[in-house]
């Protein structure tokens, strides 16, 4: 049974189809990359998964649940952190944790502050943090309830290499426990380094899915082809 | 792990209120914040006392108890209701921000829970900001031996009104989301027809129109508000307004079930604008901002309220029109300056080879020119109030003086808050209004214009050797303004 199962998903905005009969199933125990150029429909798909957008048609199942009843089991890292600027880092984590109904919240918040290296910033107002620090707070908020499915929309944006490694380890730990980390990105290097498997999305539908070897075969690229070569070849016909 | 319902409502309300309070307090020192509250209390309170207790025409015609007062208050409330309805049709009703979507709605909190949390938070703020306004009227009422405890009810009633407006706007937003595009046209048409009929009712004295006016919710609330001021307060009326509010909130809460908050991504097709060649890019960008953000409408809305108030006061024998005309120009000038300062992206200009003098001069040129557009409206107000048109030069002087004053004040008073500088604009307003009272108009007018020009000369003289410093500082002011906006 796939952890995430999307069938014939459609979403249009003012007549413009952003997601066009998208089908995707993702098994548990992996970091999965949703790879696509700007405007391919990655964010729209992710927002429908989180329940922030309602699909025009199609179905989504997460951990065999329907109708967004999976929200409690999901963590979401948005593209722009968009935090409550006038709460402190500690208060922000506490606020989200409380809404999530996390037990033993004090210890959990302390652990995340330590893990994300935010200890010395815990009593500072979010507005005073750098972009990278805000991203760390967003990641900590998304994982405060130890979700089974972690969804990140360009989650590594603005993070330094050390923090990127920490986030990768965090996602890996979820995957190892049987969960799923779904990461959208348009940066091929990120997908290649972070993801066990990827799906290439363009114009709202999936062009290909699998690990690098699968994609090479599908795109008929050579043995020495990189993900960049594969991506460009697959999306070649799609672009003008 | 499921979140309990009551817990979610109080948690959202508590943390959002905490954030909002911090946002306000981070812009001011405690002293400056208290100063602003006191200033609001004095300015608005004095206006209130002046209009309803001191002006001979109003006081003699029965003061607050006069039916005409109820009509004016009802009309002003109606005006705010219309503005809220229009806001609601534009989606402003259920004010869900992207951060709320990301951090509240992804946790499983429902829109219905959010509505209640939002109401609690909104009520707190409405109370905090309306209560100080009653300070001066309360003291006046005490000296007039009216029952002081009634004054406590006034901010509560006003808060009920604010929440009602918010609920109505939310209902319209939700309704539109589930309805069709024809709804806003129908809503506007109904509002226009009712407004015209009500305004016509005292003129025609038509009994059917009077019934329409009587059943307006704003008329009911106007009676409750005035009742709390003059002591003709009735508990039943007060409880009824609370019950109406509760019904409205319950309705919003019910309607919001199944309301999907959708954050529209950037791929939504926007309006296409014609390409314009910019002969003067600095001035053009400010003009485009004011035009496209429709900032020019705010002063016109203020003018609409003043016209209603002015007609009422003129019919009562007194005329506040010169005051209103001056106030309109002050508000226009303030709003335009604020918008330009707040929305300025200084880093773009600073990365170019432009001098601070050129940028600030361009801003002033645009601001003063645009303020002139409102002068004919000020003239109309003076004509309606049968006031002396010689007051116009004084009003012109206000338009000239405020932009440089605000730029200077937002730098000078940066530690005590950007908003304080706007309140300080009264310093230019007061002499312009008082001088024509003390000396003949034809002497006061050139004196005031001369004052404006001298003010400019001093501004440029003082700034001539400090442009670079101002350049640095104005960046702070602009960023500060942006913080205020968010």
Image (cartoon, helix red, strand yellow):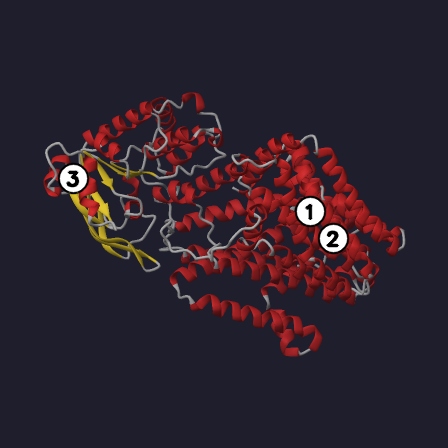
Q: Quadrant of residue A224?
A: top left
Q: Quadrant of residue B8?
A: top left
Q: Nearer the viewer, residue A232 or B418?
A: A232
Label 3 residue SS: loop
Query: Of callouts 1 and 2, which one flags the residue occurring earlier in the amino acid sequence?
Result: 2
Q: Dots 2 and 3: beta carbons under 8 Å? A: no
Mark yes or no: residue B66 visible.
Answer: no
Q: Position of residue A218 (x, y in %)?
A: 11, 42
Q: CA distance from mark 1 to mark 3?
A: 61 Å
- Residue B355 vs B135, above or below: the answer is above
Q: Chain of mark 3?
A: A
Q: Which mark is residue B194?
A: none
Q: CA distance from mark 2 to mark 3?
A: 68 Å
Q: Are marks 1 and 2 in contact (CB under 8 Å)?
A: yes
- For the question of whether residue A120 can be seen, the reply is yes
| Left/right of residue B30 with respect to residue B256 in the rendered view | right
Q: Where residue B13 sits: x, y (%)?
A: 48, 42
- Residue B54: x and y in percent read 82, 55
Q: Which disc number belongs to residue B48?
A: 2
Give the class, few, some or many, for how many residues have Cα within 10 Å of label 2's Cα (few <14, many ≥20). Answer: some
Q: Residue at x 20, y 40 (%)?
A: A231
* Residue B235 x/y as whole percent: 63, 57
Indicate whether B62 appears above or below A19: below
Q: Which residue is mark 3?
A: A27
Q: Residue at x 61, y 63 (%)?
A: B78
- Asked if labels 1 and 2 share a chain, the reply is yes
């Amino acid at each position: 049974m796939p952890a995430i199962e999307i069938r014939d998903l459609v979403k249009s905005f003012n007549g413009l189809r952003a997601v066009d009969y998208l089908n995707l199933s993702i098994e548990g125990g992996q970091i999965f990359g949703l790879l696509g150029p700007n405007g391919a429909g990655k964010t729209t798909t992710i927002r429908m998964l989180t329940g922030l957008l309602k699909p025009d048609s199609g179905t989504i199942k997460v951990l065999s649940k329907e109708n967004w009843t999976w929200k409690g089991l999901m963590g979401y890292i948005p593209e722009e952190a968009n935090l409550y600027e006038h709460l402190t880092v500690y208060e922000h984590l506490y606020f989200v944790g409380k809404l999530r109904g996390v037990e033993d919240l004090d210890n959990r918040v302390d652990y995340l502050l330590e893990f994300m290296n935010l200890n010395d910033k815990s009593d500072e107002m979010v507005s005073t943090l750098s972009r990278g620090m805000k991203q760390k707070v967003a990641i900590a908020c998304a994982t405060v309830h130890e979700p089974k499915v972690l969804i990140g929309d360009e989650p590594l944006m603005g993070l330094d290499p050390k923090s990127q490694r920490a986030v990768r380890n965090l996602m890996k730990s979820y995957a190892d426990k049987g969960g799923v980390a779904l990461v959208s990105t348009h940066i091929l290097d990120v997908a290649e380094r972070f993801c066990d498997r990827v799906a290439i999305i363009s114009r709202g539908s999936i062009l290909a899915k699998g690990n690098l070897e699968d994609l090479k075969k599908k795109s008929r690229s050579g043995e020495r082809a990189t993900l960049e070569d594969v991506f460009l070849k697959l999306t070649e016909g799609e672009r003008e | 792990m499921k979140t309990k319902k009551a817990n979610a409502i109080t948690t959202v309300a508590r943390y959002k209120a905490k954030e909002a309070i911090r946002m306000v307090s981070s812009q001011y020192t405690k002293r400056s914040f208290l100063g602003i509250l006191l200033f609001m209390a004095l300015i608005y309170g004095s206006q209130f006392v002046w209009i309803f207790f001191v002006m001979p025409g109003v006081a003699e015609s029965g003061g607050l108890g006069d039916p005409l007062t109820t009509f004016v208050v009802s009309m002003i409330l109606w005006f705010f209701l219309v503005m809220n309805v229009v806001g609601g049709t534009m989606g402003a009703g259920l004010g869900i921000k992207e951060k709320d979507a990301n951090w509240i709605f992804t946790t499983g909190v429902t829109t219905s829970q959010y509505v209640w949390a939002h109401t609690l938070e909104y009520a707190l703020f409405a109370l905090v900001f309306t209560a100080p306004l009653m300070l001066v009227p309360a003291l006046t009422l005490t000296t007039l031996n009216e029952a002081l405890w009634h004054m406590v009810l006034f901010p509560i009633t006003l808060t009920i009104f604010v929440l009602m407006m918010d609920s109505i706007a939310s209902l319209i937003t939700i309704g539109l989301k589930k309805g069709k595009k024809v709804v806003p046209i129908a809503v506007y048409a109904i509002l226009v027809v009712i407004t015209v009929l009500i305004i016509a009712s005292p003129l025609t004295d038509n009994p059917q129109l009077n019934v329409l006016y009587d059943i307006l919710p704003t008329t009911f609330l106007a009676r409750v508000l005035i009742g709390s001021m003059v002591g003709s307060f009735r508990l039943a009326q007060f409880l009824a307004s609370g019950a109406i509010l509760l019904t409205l909130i319950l309705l919003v809460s019910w309607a919001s079930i199944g309301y999907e908050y959708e954050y529209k991504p950037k791929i939504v097709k926007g309006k296409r604008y014609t390409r314009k060649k910019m002969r003067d890019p600095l001035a053009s960008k400010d003009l485009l901002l004011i035009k496209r953000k429709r900032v020019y409408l705010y002063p016109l809305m203020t003018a609409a309220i003043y016209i209603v108030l002015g007609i009422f006061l003129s019919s009562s024998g007194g005329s506040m029109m010169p005051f209103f005309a001056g106030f309109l120009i002050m508000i226009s000038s303030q709003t335009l300056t604020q918008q330009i300062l707040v929305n300025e992206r200084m880093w773009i200009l600073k990365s170019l080879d432009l001098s601070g003098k050129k940028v600030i001069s361009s801003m002033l040129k645009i601001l003063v020119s645009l303020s002139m557009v409102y002068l004919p409206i000020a003239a109309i107000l003076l004509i309606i109030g049968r006031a002396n048109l010689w007051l116009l030069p004084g009003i012109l002087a206000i338009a000239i003086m405020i932009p440089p004053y605000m730029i200077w004040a937002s730098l000078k008073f940066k530690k005590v808050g950007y908003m304080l500088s706007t309140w300080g604009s009264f310093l230019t307003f007061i002499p312009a209004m008082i001088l024509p009272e003390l000396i003949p108009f034809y002497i006061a007018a050139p004196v005031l214009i001369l004052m404006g020009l001298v003010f400019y000369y001093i501004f440029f003289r003082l700034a001539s050797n400090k442009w670079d410093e101002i350049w640095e500082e104005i960046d702070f002011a602009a960023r500060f303004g942006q913080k205020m906006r968010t």
